[in-house]
Amino acid sequence: MENYSPICPSSSSSHREFSLMNSKSTTDHAKEELLFQGKNNGFLGLMASMETPSGVTNNGFEKEVKSCKKKAEKKIKKPRYAFQTRSQVDILDDGYRWRKYGQKAVKNNKFSRSYYRCTHQGCNVKKQVQRLCKDEEVVVTTYEGMHSHPIDKSTDNFEHILSQMQIYASF
DNA sequence: CGCCTTTGACCGGCGC
DNA sequence: GCGCCGGTCAAAGGCG
């Protein structure tokens, strides 16, 4: 928790990661994911967009993802937001309380992907956390849905969390 | 004692 | 039609 390299050391690194995500998205619906790379305002701007669904998400960011899941709204497609963060820990606590409900091995990746669900009553937000096989320090977190309830933890703690996550926020 | 993780099974979609 | 694959369920065990 103390030896994080403050920034992504080179821009080429982020470029490579992005390419990797694109190549992976050759499988049909994955291309509909939104991949956010923390660059200028990276994560903070992103969180703002998540907390204001009528804001950025309606500017065309809100993609429709095919989700014909049985339990969820059959025809309603949910937006997904992917983040790349640089952290040595898998658990990137964003202030909400998550319960893990699954874990699957990912192809072309020696690490596995974890599936989490928000435990707040009535909140159906899901997220999945995955590491890149080549860059162990890079963690991809994909959020699905939007929280309709306040954060459990304090903002103070959240700042601490941000410092842990080490986004590419120094440009 | 209650919540959470783990883990194998199951299910639906899609490609061949 | 069949098999693969990604995502989810649910039982059982663990931990604070």
Image (spheres, coloured by chain):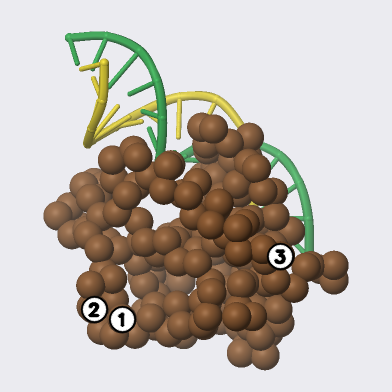
Chain colours: A brown, B yellow, C green
The answer to whether tags 3 and 2 share a subunit is yes
Foreground residue among A138 and A127 = A138
Q: For the point 28% across and 40% down, which residue is it?
A: A28
> SS of the residue at dot 2?
helix
User: From mark 3 to mark 2, how far is it between C-alphas?
Assistant: 32 Å
Q: Residues within 10 Å of mark 2 (few under 14, many from 20)?
A: few
Q: Which mark is nearer the camera, 3 or 2?
A: 3
Chain where mark 1 sits: A
Q: Residue A93 is drawn in which quadrant? A: bottom right
Residue type beneath disc 2: Asn
Residue type beneath disc 3: Pro
Tell me, for residue A56, which label it has, or none: 1
Q: Is residue A122 visible?
A: yes
Q: Residue tagged by mark 2?
A: A59
User: From mark 3 to mark 1, how far is it between C-alphas?
Assistant: 29 Å
Residue A135 locus on image (x, y percent): 67, 48
Q: Residue A161 is drawn in which quadrant? A: bottom right
Q: Residue tagged by mark 3?
A: A9
Residue A71 locus on image (x, y percent): 26, 51
Chain where mark 3 sits: A
Whether tag 3 and tag 1 are in contact, CB under 8 A, the answer is no
Residue A7 locus on image (x, y percent): 70, 71
Q: Earlier in the sequence, mark 3 or mark 1?
A: 3
Q: Earlier in the sequence, mark 3 or mark 2?
A: 3
> SS of the residue at dot 1?
helix
Q: Is residue C7 left or right of residue A67?
A: right
